[in-house]
Image (tube, rainbow, N blue to C red):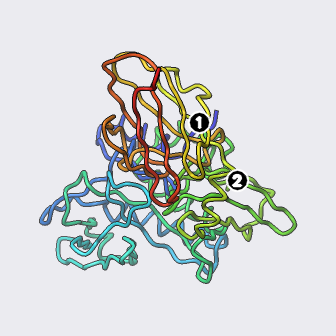
Amino acid sequence: MRLPIALAVSTLLSMSASGQAAAQTGEQAPDGNPTPEVVVDGSRHGLKPYRIMSAGLDAFDEHRKLAPAAALKFRLLQNGASYGEPQKWDSVTLRLAGDEFSIPLPIEADGTFTLPRSQAAFDQDADLVLNRNKSTISYYTKVLTPGLADNVRRMGDLRLQCEVTIAIGKKELNFAQRAFYNTVLFGGDWCTSRKATFGLLLDDWPMKVTLVDKDKRKTLRADGYRLVTPIQDSSLSDEALITFEYWSQASAERKREFIATTPLFLKSSAFKWNAGTPFREVEKGRYVAQIALSRGESKLRLESADGQLALGAPARGDTRIDTSATTKLKYHGGRLVIQTDQPGAYEVSLDLRDPDHPEMAISRAES
């Protein structure tokens, strides 16, 4: 069994007496994981203690050969925000605060910030302090070699990113906890263990992901806004590149082609998310599918067999839909929840004539 690396860190930290939250691994989604401490102005218990974060700076220097030209940044995330939606940071401030100093750390438009080396911050056990409630913001590490296109990531960068993240996570574990995972699961280097996975959170969802390494070329499968990266594959060089064909960067013609060649299925919790009923096209860009529902609550998903194309609620999590109104959908969005008072056959109509604004309607099927 392969485990997400963050799960190991999160599980142990949740068991520890300190109750400290775990660091996210790679760029995994913040929901479903313990949230790092973030508190309001004036408190010394901030995003993370500098001594813990500095372990990531040490790891970056130690493993720099993986990405000699890369820069290390940390990126903030607003918990609960929908994937792919822009986040605003104008009103968010971050500072490095010790007993005798307070240094502002500028937050860039994309939520990233740079953590400087500071012996004074280490000696005074300084904290990274945000002007936000502790439950609203988390972070992840980001290592990026300059000069790459926005839709390209380098294998060595991802490997170094993992080393930084795990170094920070390990710093929060005691000796016995580290020894347990080193011995039982991952060995000394968790980022190279075949028993672990390293997830990358994406700003957009890709229609296609291609790995190129010299004469090797391979298609990878993303799970919506997340990709499990092959950083443990020692046959891949650090110079290997992963290229993403993002939805937002594609032409309208390419989007329609992708939809037309990627059949969608209607799936339901009522049938334990089995293969589902295929949508059939009734006119160009418009599709229908029928499903039998019993009285009560059911959850729906609209997705292709391989998960490359999926449609759901605009917000994350479960969203109740009104059967008397049209529902706007989001690619790889949350689950749709329907409450039916009358059991029987229901028809789901899907309108994809405007690929960027999909809509759905559900009604009782005519007998």
Q: Is residue 50 left or right of residue 282?
A: left
Foreground pick, 51 / 344: 344
- What residue is drawn where x is 37% and y is 54%? 82
Question: Judging from the image, what secondary structure is the residue with disc 1 in?
Answer: strand
Name the one closer to the observer, 363 or 221. 363
**Residue at the outermost right position:** 215
Residue identified by numbered label 1: 265
Kind of residue at badge 2: Leu
Q: Quadrant of residue 108?
A: bottom left
Q: Name the residue beneath numbered marker 2.
A: 220
Q: Please name whichever residue, 62 or 235, is drawn nearer the observer in this view of the structure.
A: 235
Between the C-alphas of marks 2 and 1, the distance is: 22 Å
Q: In this view, does 285 lie above or below 241?
A: above
- Does residue 107 appear to the left or right of 236 in the view shown? left
Residue contact between numbered discs 2 and 1, judged by CB atoms under 8 Å: no
Q: How crowded is mark 1: few (under 14 residues within 10 Å), some or many (20 or more)?
A: many
State the image quarter where residue 304 is shown.
top right
Quadrant where the image shows the N terminus:
top right
Which tag, 2 or 1, sits closer to the chain's start?
A: 2
Q: Where is residue 287 in the image (x, y as percent from the top left)?
A: 55, 43
Instruction: Tell me residue 150's x, y (percent).
Output: 57, 74
Residue drawn at x 36%, y 30% as measured from the top left = 338
Q: Residue furthest bottom?
A: 147
Callout 2: 10 Å neighbours few (<14), some, many (20+)? some
- Where 333 falls versus 272 (above or below)? below
Residue 183: x and y in percent read 60, 37
Q: Which-is-in-front pick, marks 2 and 1?
A: 1
The residue located at (64%, 73%) in the rendering is: 67
Residue 164 versus residue 131: which sits nearer the camera?
A: 131
Q: Is mark 2 on a helix, strand or loop?
A: strand
